[in-house]
């Protein structure tokens, strides 16, 4: 076992365990914390793959911004505990949160993703980029040259969402701020 | 990887943590002394010569205190929050380079734990996680004062992060890299970045005070209204972790300010690079933190948010445009 292998095992374990706890934690705040840990674990895996930029953005956007909004929403609502739906083995097996259905769904989704990856694998560059440690430049080039139009379309979508939020929270009759 | 074993990294991490902790302890003494002199008092003088053993006494007192926890508190989150805050503060410092790598008898000693090509982005990303500890700590205490304090603190940190980002991006555009050593190298080739980018530097200083929730931006712990804000219910070592995290965040931001705008480890007047230059600049920057703290009274909360969104962010944008024009029109290159 060398350093990267140990790091990979720790990070993968952390990610899987906290992803499992997101679904099973009885308290919403705990689930949010575990979701944050999942995001951080994925960022660590990106770091291990030497995708510095992706890792930093994963931390900044998902673990930072998205989770802050989630935690704010939880703090400002009265939501604390999820109703326990597990009374006895029968209801535990049939529960939509802990039972058979999410297990089958999860395993099925993983199988689909793996098979899709295997189909696409030949066209996927498996060897690491030769001597291109500056992944930021690479991503910026792709984003602002080849994929400039999709990038702009995504920002229009965000703008529409922002305008929607403003309309939803606007008080009737245009109260003065 | 790169001939650096996990053990070597661990050893350097432990050394860095010990250094940061002792720097924290003695910065506290310095702060109390300086504030004392500003207010025509002596500051701590009783424990040891010139009060130099004060941090030991403080640490002993903190450790000996009862570890109280409110009955209604959420156990797990209440315990995780201070640890998370401290961890995030320490992790952000890991990619801060204190100087060029040292060669001691053929033995390579890099002066940072890791040096990713996107080091600056990593610092910002990790620092943005600091909000968690504060908002969760306040929430888990299940007390009105703590909750209000944590809401204020997190809203303030999220708002000022934007203006801070604007100032940092202007330095990145100027230097053309996200790697901290490369930004310093750029400044050694040309001038220090604050000369064309003085607005960015001023915004960075203001935002770094706001990001660490210190006076005059310490609305989150306004004693008169909120008792002590988000850490009202904490005591003993958990309280100390919050304080420690605040001071280590100050070290990180002062190092970042020195690296981005003040030429990093390059000496003034063409003097050669050295770790001591960076440490001197950090010390001056930290002194500025204290100076601001003793000079200005606390700002009202709505004014604070207005100042952040309606003054700093627009000026940050304008400054970014000016720096882009400067770079495109020849500038440094």
Image: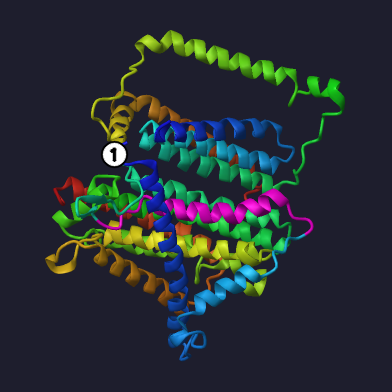
Residue drawn where x is 33% and y is 29% of the image? A143
Q: Quadrant of the C terminus of chain A?
A: bottom right
Q: Which residue is mark 1?
A: B3
Query: In percent of the image, x 48 and y 31: which residue is there?
Result: A157
- Residue A143 visible in the snapshot: yes
Along the line of sight, the residue nearer the viewer: B58 or B278:
B58
**Front one among B166 and B44:** B44
The answer to whether residue A28 is magenta is no
| Residue B124: image location, x then y, percent | 42, 49
Chain name for mark 1: B
Q: Residue furthest right?
A: A88
Our reading of the magenta stretch's main secondary structure is: helix
Q: Which residues are magenta?
A: B71-99
Secondary structure type for disc 1 = loop
Say which residue appears at 45% left-offset and 81% top-offset: B52
- In the rendered image, the vertical position of residue A32 relative to residue B18, given as above or below: above
């Amino acid at each position: 076992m060398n350093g990267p292998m140990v790091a990979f095992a720790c990070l993968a374990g952390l990610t899987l365990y906290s992803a499992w706890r997101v679904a099973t934690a009885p308290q919403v705040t705990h689930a949010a914390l575990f979701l944050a840990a999942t995001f951080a674990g994925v960022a660590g895996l990106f770091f291990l793959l030497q995708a510095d930029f992706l890792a930093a953005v994963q931390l900044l956007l998902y673990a930072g911004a998205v989770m802050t909004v989630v935690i704010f929403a939880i703090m400002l609502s009265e939501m604390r505990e999820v109703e326990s739906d597990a009374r006895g083995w029968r209801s535990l097996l049939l529960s939509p949160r802990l039972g058979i259905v999410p297990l089958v769904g999860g395993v099925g989704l993983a199988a689909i993703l793996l098979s899709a990856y295997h189909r696409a694998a030949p066209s996927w560059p498996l060897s690491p980029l030769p001597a291109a440690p500056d992944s930021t430049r690479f991503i910026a080039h792709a984003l602002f040259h080849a994929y400039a139009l999709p990038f702009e379309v995504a920002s229009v979508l965000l703008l529409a969402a922002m305008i929607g939020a403003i309309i939803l929270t606007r008080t009737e009759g245009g109260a003065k701020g | 990887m790169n001939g650096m074993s996990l053990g070597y990294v661990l050893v350097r991490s432990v050394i860095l943590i010990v250094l940061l902790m002792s720097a924290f302890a003695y910065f506290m003494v310095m702060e109390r002394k300086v504030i004392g002199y500003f207010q025509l008092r002596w500051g701590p003088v009783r424990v040891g010569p010139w009060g130099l053993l004060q941090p030991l006494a403080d640490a002993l007192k903190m450790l000996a205190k009862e570890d109280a926890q409110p009955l209604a508190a959420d156990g797990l989150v209440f315990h995780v929050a201070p640890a998370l805050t401290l961890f995030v503060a320490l992790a952000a410092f890991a990619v801060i380079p204190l100087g060029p790598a040292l060669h001691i008898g053929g033995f390579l000693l890099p002066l940072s734990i890791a040096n990713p090509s996107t080091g600056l982005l990593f610092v910002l990303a990790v620092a943005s996680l600091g909000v968690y500890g504060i908002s969760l700590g306040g929430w888990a205490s299940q007390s009105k004062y703590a909750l209000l304090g944590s809401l204020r603190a997190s809203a303030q940190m999220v708002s000022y992060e934007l203006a801070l980002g604007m100032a940092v991006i202007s330095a990145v555009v100027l230097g053309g890299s996200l790697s901290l050593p490369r930004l310093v190298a750029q400044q050694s080739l040309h001038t220090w970045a604050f000369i064309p980018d003085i607005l960015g530097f001023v915004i960075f200083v203001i935002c770094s005070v706001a990001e660490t929730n210190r006076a005059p931006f310490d609305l989150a712990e306004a004693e008169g209204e909120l008792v002590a804000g988000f850490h009202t219910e904490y005591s003993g070592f958990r309280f100390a972790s919050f304080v420690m995290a605040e001071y280590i965040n100050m070290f990180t931001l002062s190092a970042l300010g020195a690296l981005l705008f003040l030429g990093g480890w390059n000496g003034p007047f063409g003097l050669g690079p050295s770790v001591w230059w960076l440490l001197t600049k950090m010390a001056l920057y930290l002194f500025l933190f204290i100076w601001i703290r003793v000079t200005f009274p606390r700002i009202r909360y709505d004014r604070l948010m207005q100042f952040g969104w309606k003054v700093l962010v627009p000026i940050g944008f304008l400054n970014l445009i000016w720096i882009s024009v400067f770079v495109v029109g020849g500038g440094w290159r």
